[in-house]
């Protein structure tokens, strides 16, 4: 299946809102760190329901573009806001339909690793961000998070599983400085009592605690020189 087929189906089934609920737990902490100012132009890469763009627009007054490869996702996202300073566009990470230096900042949550060629996607981000611009890249699927390793089995789109070093190396190879990298724990996902394990997803309570409270979301921040 293509990105479009896979995620159009998710959007039609309403899974965009489910992702929003889950991802917000850690995405909001990444968003809070972004140095966005009123009037800045911000790209939300793989916008899904568009919640990150709405939050950026609401809290800073920035102009936001949410890009997604799924027309159904983009259409849903459009319907969730009437702000005329947020736009939604269908496009692919590897060929961003924007001029050089078009954005001041970019954000992406749980989307970057779906790029057909993540190195090319980073090169495109580097090209479309102005000097001094930042890319906040948040992912839950990464090598150190052993509890994410089987996620590829349930989705037909190929996913790239880098470790923390590989993220930093790839950002540098694309011409970014790496300004920061850390993991953001999810303290909101409810963890049931010991007696409820095993669950469908976790063999032990310890494993679930590790997945959410220890590993959480990997954030890598790149800055264009
Ligand atoms: C797991 S969802 C995450 C959505 C949202 N950022 C969130 O946090 O809920 C990944 C999104 O990225 C989009 N996507 C995946 N690969 C893409 C690609 N190569 N080009 C454009 N969009 C892509 C999908 O259509 C989907 O909406």
Image (cartoon, rainbow, N blue to C red):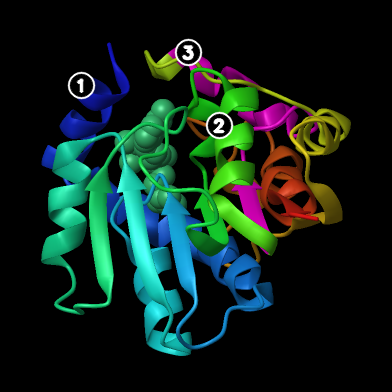
Q: Quadrant of ligand 1?
A: top left
Earlier residue among tags 3 and 1: 1
Q: What separation in Å lies between label 3 and label 2 (alpha carbons)?
A: 23 Å
Q: Which residue is mark 3?
A: 153
Few, some or many residues within 10 Å of mark 1 (<14, 14–19, 20+): some
Residue 145 lies in the magenta stretch = yes
Which of discs 3 and 1 lies nearer the camera? The answer is 1
Residue at 18% across, 73% down: 81
Q: Which residue is mark 2?
A: 121
Residue at 49% across, 77% down: 40
Few, some or many residues within 10 Å of mark 2 (<14, 14–19, 20+): many
Confirm or deny contact between disc 3 and disc 2 (CB under 8 A). no
The answer to whether mark 2 is within 8 Å of ligand 1 is yes
Where is residue 82 shown, x and y percent of the image? 14, 77
Which quadrant does the C terminus fall into?
bottom right
Residue 142 lies in the magenta stretch = yes
Q: What separation in Å lies between label 3 and label 1 (alpha carbons)?
A: 17 Å
Which quadrant does the N terminus fall into?
top left
Q: Which residue is mark 1?
A: 5
Earlier residue among tags 2 and 1: 1
Where is residue 208 shown, x and y percent of the image? 67, 44
The stretch of residues the image draws in magenta is 133-153
Residue at 35% across, 40% down: 97
Few, some or many residues within 10 Å of mark 3 (<14, 14–19, 20+): few
**Does the image show residue 146?**
yes
- Along the line of sight, which residue is nearer the eye, 47 or 103? 103
Which of discs 3 and 2 lies nearer the camera? The answer is 2
- Along the line of sight, which residue is nearer the eye, 162 or 146? 162
């Amino acid at each position: 299946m293509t990105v479009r087929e896979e995620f159009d189906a998710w959007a039609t089934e309403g899974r965009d809102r489910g992702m929003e609920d889950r991802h917000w737990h850690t995405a909001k902490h990444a968003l809070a760190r972004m140095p966005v100012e009123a009037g800045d132009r911000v790209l939300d890469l793989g916008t899904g329901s568009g919640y990150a763009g709405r939050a950026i627009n609401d809290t800073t007054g920035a102009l936001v573009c949410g890009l997604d490869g799924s027309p159904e996702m983009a259409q849903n996202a459009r319907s969730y806001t009437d702000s005329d300073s947020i736009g939604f566009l269908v496009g692919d990470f590897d060929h961003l339909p924007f001029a050089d230096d078009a954005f001041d900042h970019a954000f992406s949550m749980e989307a970057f690793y779906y790029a057909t060629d993540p190195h090319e996607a980073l090169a495109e981000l580097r090209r479309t961000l102005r000097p001094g611009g930042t890319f906040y890249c948040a992912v839950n699927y990464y090598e150190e998070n052993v509890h994410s390793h089987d996620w590829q089995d349930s989705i037909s789109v190929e996913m790239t599983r880098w470790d923390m070093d590989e993220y930093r190396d790839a950002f540098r190879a694309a011409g970014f400085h790496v300004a920061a990298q850390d993991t953001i724990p999810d303290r909101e996902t409810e963890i049931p009592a010991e007696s409820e394990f095993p669950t469908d997803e976790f063999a032990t309570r310890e494993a679930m605690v590790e997945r959410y409270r220890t590993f959480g979301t990997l954030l890598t921040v790149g800055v264009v020189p």
